[in-house]
Image: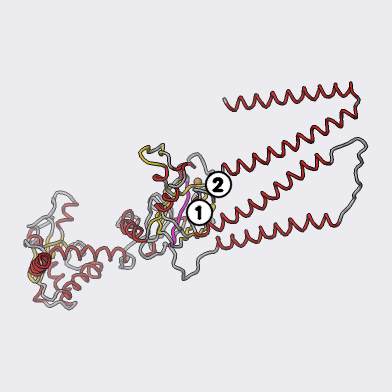
Amino acid sequence: MTALLAILCIILIAVIAVQIGKVTELASKIRGEEDAQERSNRTTSRWLLVFMVLFLVFCIVSAYYYKNYMLGYGPHEAASAHGKSLDRMFNITTIVTGIVFVITQIALFWFSYKYRQRKGGKAIFMPHNNTLEVVWTVIPAVVMTFLVVGGLDAWNDVMADVGTDEDVIEIEAMGYQFAWQLRYPGPDGKLGARDFRLTSGTNPVGQDWTDEANLDDFHPSEIVLPVGKKVRVRILARDVLHDFYLPQFRVKMDAVPGMPTYFVFTPEKTTEEYRQSLREYPEYQVPDPADPEKQLWETFNYELACAELCGTGHWSMRRLVRIVSEEEYKDWLDQQQSYYMTAIYQTENDPWPIDGELPSVVSGARKQEFNSLLDGAMNAGSAEDRTFVLKYVTFESGSAALTELSKKYELANVVEAMNEYPELVIGLGGHTDNTGDAEANMLLSQQRAEAVRDYLVANGVPADRLVATGYGQNDPLGDNGTEAGREKNRRTEFTVLAGGLMADVETTTEESATEETE
Ligand SMILES: [Cu+2]
C-alpha cells in the first residue's frame, strides 16, 4: 500500500514538473526568450543547491540512523581477533570515500550554480592545465595506494596459514545440498585421511578407515570451540559451490568442489560474553518472537550459514556455533563419540583387524572395558558378582586353539592384571552352547579353559593362581534356540577366587567415615 502511494506521488510530481515546464515555455514566448532563460537558470541552480543540502543531510542522517545494522558498529562487533582489523579497514575506507563523496557532491552542485549560463557570460578556453592534472592524479593515487596496501596487509594477515608447530584446533566443514557435514579430530588432534571415492551413505566425508587418525574423528551437529584458541577450518564442498560464513567472526570462504580451502581464526568472545554485550542495546531488549519468555539478547547464538545461493534448500544450511570456556570445551569433547566406533566398527565396512592388529581406539576401549569389569569383580561382595565374561577371548572354530587376537589383546590385559595384583587367584571357566554331544562339549570347554590357563602360565603367571574348569553346556547365559543366544553361551569366564579388594574396600570406607566424624 505504502509502495503504491509512493509510486503515485512520483507520477504526480513528474506530471506537475512537465506542466510547469510547459507554462514557463509559454511565458518565455510572451516575455522575451533571453530574460526568461536567465531567470530559469538562476531558479534551477538555486533549487539544485537546496537539493544538495537536503541530499547530504539525508545521507548523513540515514548513515547515522542505520549504523547499528552494519557490521563493525554497535551490536555487530567482531568476535574474532582478525575481525577487528577487517572492521577497521572497512571503516577507514568508508571514511575516506565518504569525505570524497561529500566534497564532490558539494563541488558538483556549487559549480552548476556558480557557472550557470548568464547574459553576456563567456566560457574560458582552457585546453590543458598541468597543475590540475597533477593534483587530481596524485591525490587519488596516494589515497588508493594507502587503501590498497592497507587492505593487502590485512588480507595477508587474515589469510595467513598456521605454522607447522603451532597449537591449533583443526576442524573440517563439508558443504552439501543442503547441510554442513562437520568433522572434528578426536583426542589425537589429527583429522584422518580422506578420499572422495570412499564417500558413501555410511561414510559421508569419504574417510579412509585404514588410517588410524580417522578412527577417533567425530561428526558433531554443531560447532563448539574454546575461546582464545586458534582454529583452522578445512572447507570442502561435495556437490555445488557453498560458502562457509561465520558473520560474527568475519569468516567467509567459498567451499568449492575439488578445491579445498581453509580459514584460520581465533574466537575472542564466548557466546555468553557476546550476549552480555548485546544486552546493552535497546533493539535486543525486546522479547524474542520465537520464545517470548526471553529477550532477544538471551537467545542469541553465533551461527554458521551458507553464503552461496546453492539451491532451494540453501536456507536450511544454518548450524549453531557455540564458543565456550576451555573446561566446557573439554567436557563437550568427552561426550563426543567417535564416528568409527558408533557407525563403522564391526560392520561390513570395517577393514580392521588389519594384519592381525586392532586399532588403538578399539584396543584402548577393550582395555577400559576389561578394567572396569575387573574392578567390579574385585570389589564384589557375592561370589556371583565376582565373575565376568572375557568377551574377546575366542577360539578357532571347534578347537581349543586361541585366536591370535584374543592373545594379543584380552589376555594381555589379564596378564597385566595378574601382575598388578600379586594376591589375585582366579578361576577360568569354559562354556559351550548345546550343539553336538554334551560329553564332547564338556571336554572341549575343559580344553579351552586349560588353553587360556596355559597361555597365561607361558606369559609368566604362576600356575597355582589359576584354576581352569570346563562346564560344557550346563550353564547357558542365553537361549540356545537362537544363534545370538548360542554365541552368548560360548564363552570363557573370569572369576575372582581370592585376593579381591573386598576387605580393603571395607577398611577404606571405615577410615573415611572416621575421618568425616572427626
Ligand atoms: Cu550452500
Could you tell whether 300 is left or right of 391 in the image?
Answer: right
Q: Which residue is mark 2?
A: 70
Q: Of the residues shown, which amino acid type is indicated by label 1?
A: Ala
Residue 445 seen in this snapshot? no
Q: Which residue is mark 1?
A: 78
Which dot marks residue 296? none
How packed is label 2: few (under 14 Cα within 10 Å), some, or many (20 or more)? few
Residue 35 location (% of width, % of height):
89, 29
Residue 515 image-quadrant placement: bottom left
Going 61% across and 41% down the picture, which residue do you hit? Answer: 61
User: Would you say the residues marked 2 and 1 are in contact, meaning their CB atoms lie under 8 Å apart?
Assistant: no
Residue 346 shown in magenta = no
Q: Nearer the viewer, residue 407 or 93?
A: 93
Q: Quadrant of the N terminus?
A: top right
Could you tell whether 221 is left or right of 434 in the image?
Answer: right
Kind of element beneath mark 1: loop
Q: Which residues are magenta?
A: 169-176
The image's colouring method is: secondary structure
